[in-house]
């Protein structure tokens, strides 16, 4: 067959290092091209905010 499905190409988010499709806002942290597009933390509960902030701090340390 000449028609087939290609696997999705993924890149990594510059801020949180999670896999993201190209040219799409990161659903995990809300960043796109180094700018904060979505305020993800405002939609979370207090417990979820703490977990998310810890993940972002560890990702930032790992990146350095």
Image (tube, rainbow, N blue to C red):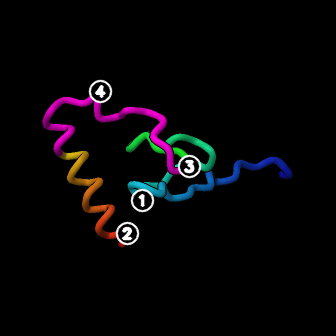
Query: Disc 1 to disc 4, how far (Cα)?
Result: 21 Å
Which residue is under mark 3? 33
Task: Determine the secondary structure under disc 4.
Answer: helix
Return the x and y of residue 36 as percentages of the image width and height. 45, 40
CB contact under 8 Å: marks 4 and 2: no
Task: Determine the secondary structure under disc 3.
Answer: loop
Residue at the image position 48 percent from the left and 36 percent from the top: 37
CB contact under 8 Å: marks 2 and 1: yes
Which residue is under mark 2? 63
Query: Disc 4 to disc 2, how far (Cα)?
Result: 26 Å
CB contact under 8 Å: marks 2 and 3: no
Query: Which label's residue is closer to the chain start, 1 or 4?
Result: 1
41 in relation to 22, above or below? above
Residue at the image position 21 percent from the left and 39 percent from the top: 49
Return the x and y of residue 34 as percentages of the image width and height. 51, 50
Looking at the rendered image, the quarter that the C terminus falls into is: bottom left
Q: Is residue 58 left or right of residue 2?
A: left
Which residue is under mark 4? 43
Task: Determine the secondary structure under disc 2.
Answer: helix
Query: Which label's residue is closer to the chain start, 2 or 1?
Result: 1
Which residue is under mark 1? 17
45 in relation to 29, above or below? above
Question: What residue range appears in magenta?
Answer: 33-50
Query: Disc 3 to disc 4, how far (Cα)?
Result: 22 Å
């Amino acid at each position: 067959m000449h028609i087939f499905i290609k696997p999705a190409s993924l890149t990594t988010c510059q801020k949180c290092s999670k896999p993201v499709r190209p040219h799409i806002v990161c659903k995990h942290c809300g960043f796109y091209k180094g700018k904060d597009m979505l305020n993800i933390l405002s939609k979370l509960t207090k417990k979820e905010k703490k977990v998310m902030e810890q993940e972002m701090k560890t990702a930032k340390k790992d990146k350095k």
